[in-house]
Amino acid sequence: MNQWAVLGTADIPNNGGQLKLSQRGQDFTIRLSGIRGDLMNSREHGSEEALAELGCARLCAVDRARVLVGGLGMGFTLAAALKSLLPSAQVIVAELIPAVIEWNRGPLGECAGQPLQDERTRLYIGDVAQLLTQNSQSFDAILLDVDNGPEGLTHSENSWLYSVDGLSALYRSLGPEGTLAIWSAGSDPLFLIRLKKSGFHAVARTVRARPKKGSRHTIFLAQKGRAMVS
């Protein structure tokens, strides 16, 4: 069997560890130093796609929809969001680590169909939290896959996004019926309560990493201004 070949490494700011991109044949993995197993795998991306499909479900016929994707990863969430939207839409993807962008422009690009090349994509290099606090326009949907869930595993400052202040900023950044979707490696009942206390109508959906199999992940789906989440 072919061995994994390391294609690149990247340090996460503020001592968040190091990412390592590896390839074996047509398969790619991204691993985080100090953590067993893959952080991301090109063969298991069903839950990343579900994040976009659930978050953008009501936008398939909305003209000029504006969507924010927090975390580029391997590009699967961005690609699924673009697939769900009209040609008039705009998707801003915020990625903290420049090397991840270069990996997606290079060897990783074909995995998700080169979503960075889509004319609807706009790239923001930096912390999604900073973008949220600086942005004066509202989004129709915000999709967050910047960490392992509400605990802020890879980047300690991500924890702000899941705090009361962070959720309030997310709420303000959404339009009147905007949708917030957050990827998590597992369930977190307390975070679901926090979402509701922040004004959202929220549910947790269990999704699989691969069709009908693979790891079970959680999508927190929160709606602003509507009694039911679609």
Image (cartoon, rainbow, N blue to C red):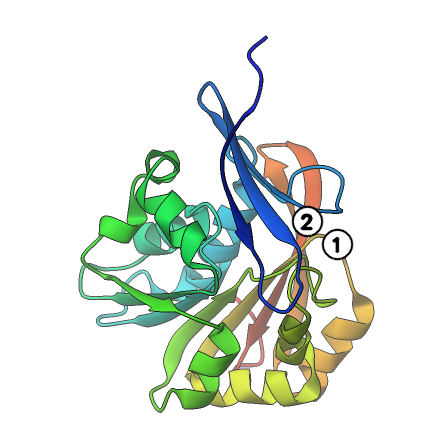
Image spot of residue 144 (x, y percent): 53, 65
Residue occupied by mark 2: 217
Quarter holding residue 227 = bottom right
Amino acid type for the residue under numbered disc 2: His
Residue occupied by mark 1: 186
Q: Is residue 62 left or right of residue 171?
A: left
Amino acid type for the residue under numbered disc 1: Gly
Please state the total of marks drawn on the protein image.
2
> Can you name the residue that lies furthest to the right here?
190
Q: Earlier in the sequence, mark 2 or mark 1?
A: 1
Q: Residue at x 49, y 90 (%)?
A: 172
Q: How far apart, in angstroms, are the residues tagged by discs 2 and 1?
A: 5 Å
Quick one: quadrant of the N terminus?
A: top right
Q: Is residue 57 left or right of residue 117?
A: right
- Image marks 2 and 1: residues in contact by CB distance under 8 Å: yes
Q: Residue at x 22, y 72 (%)?
A: 64
Whether residue 214 is visible, yes or no, is: yes
Q: Residue at x 61, y 39 (%)?
A: 209
Whether residue 199 is visible, yes or no, is: no
